[in-house]
Image (cartoon, rainbow, N blue to C red):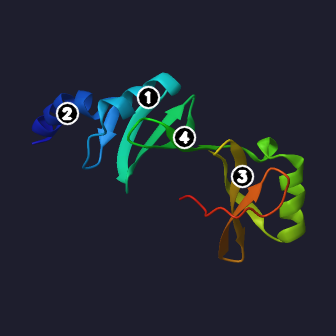
Amino acid sequence: MKKRLFILLAVAAPALGCSQKLTGVQPPSLVQNSLQVKYPAAKMVEWEKEGALYEAEFAINQIEHTVLLDATGRVVMHKQEITSSELPQEVTLGLQRDFPSHLLDDLEKVEKDGRVYFQVELENNNQDLKKVYASDGSVANLPFWD
């Protein structure tokens, strides 16, 4: 039985390592090609359909990225993981001002319509908050993108 399982895994492993994983929908080739041109180093792309948009999750140099593209291949939004040292000083000061007793958790840089935002998850005594800040350290009027 173990031998059969090993053989099955050996046969299935190459299929699991393919460069794109789709969840229920195949993006048009225009969308796939656009992603490949804009992010040629993208590895292990996973696709989902979000309303009229296509969401691609992938890694570049072990940094997670997520991109929303429209049907023409135009990037609508892009986010990537960042470290606390990559937060602008204004955002760090805004977070210290607004949430002095919270710890920073997942940090991401979000680009939309030529503007840069920073979304953060904050923790304090089992209380989790999700906030979005503009580059100037003010709270942004942009929904948190999960």
Q: Mark 2 points at which residue?
A: 12
Q: Which class describes the residues within 10 Å of circle 1: few (<14), some (14-19), or many (20+)?
A: some
User: Which mark's residue is nearer the viewer, 2 or 4?
Assistant: 4
Closer to the chain start, of discs 4 and 1, is 1
Asked whether the residues under the numbered discs 3 and 1 touch, taking CB atoms below 8 Å apart as contact, a structural biologist would say no
Task: Give the secondary structure at mark 1.
Answer: helix
Residue 100 in sight from this viewpoint:
no
Closer to the chain start, of discs 3 and 1, is 1
Q: Residue 70 has which mark?
A: none
Q: What is the CA distance from the residue labelled 2 to the residue labelled 1?
A: 29 Å
Residue 74 in sight from this viewpoint:
yes
Q: Name the residue under label 1.
A: 34
Q: Mark 4 points at which residue?
A: 65
Q: Is residue 16 left or right of residue 40?
A: left
Q: Which amino acid does label 2 sit on?
A: Ala
The picture quadrant where one finds residue 124 is: bottom right
Task: Give the secondary structure at mark 3.
Answer: strand
Residue drawn 31% across the image and 30% down it: 29
Residue drawn 71% across the image and 51% down it: 117
Q: Mark 3 points at which residue?
A: 118
The picture quadrant where one finds residue 134 is: bottom right
Q: What residue type is labelled 3?
A: Phe
Residue drawn 38% across the image and 34% down it: 31
User: Which mark's residue is nearer the viewer, 3 or 1?
Assistant: 1
* Number of on-image labels: 4
Closer to the chain start, of discs 3 and 2, is 2
Task: Give the secondary structure at mark 2.
Answer: helix
Q: What is the CA distance from the residue labelled 3 to the residue labelled 4?
A: 14 Å
User: Which mark's residue is nearer the viewer, 3 or 2?
Assistant: 3
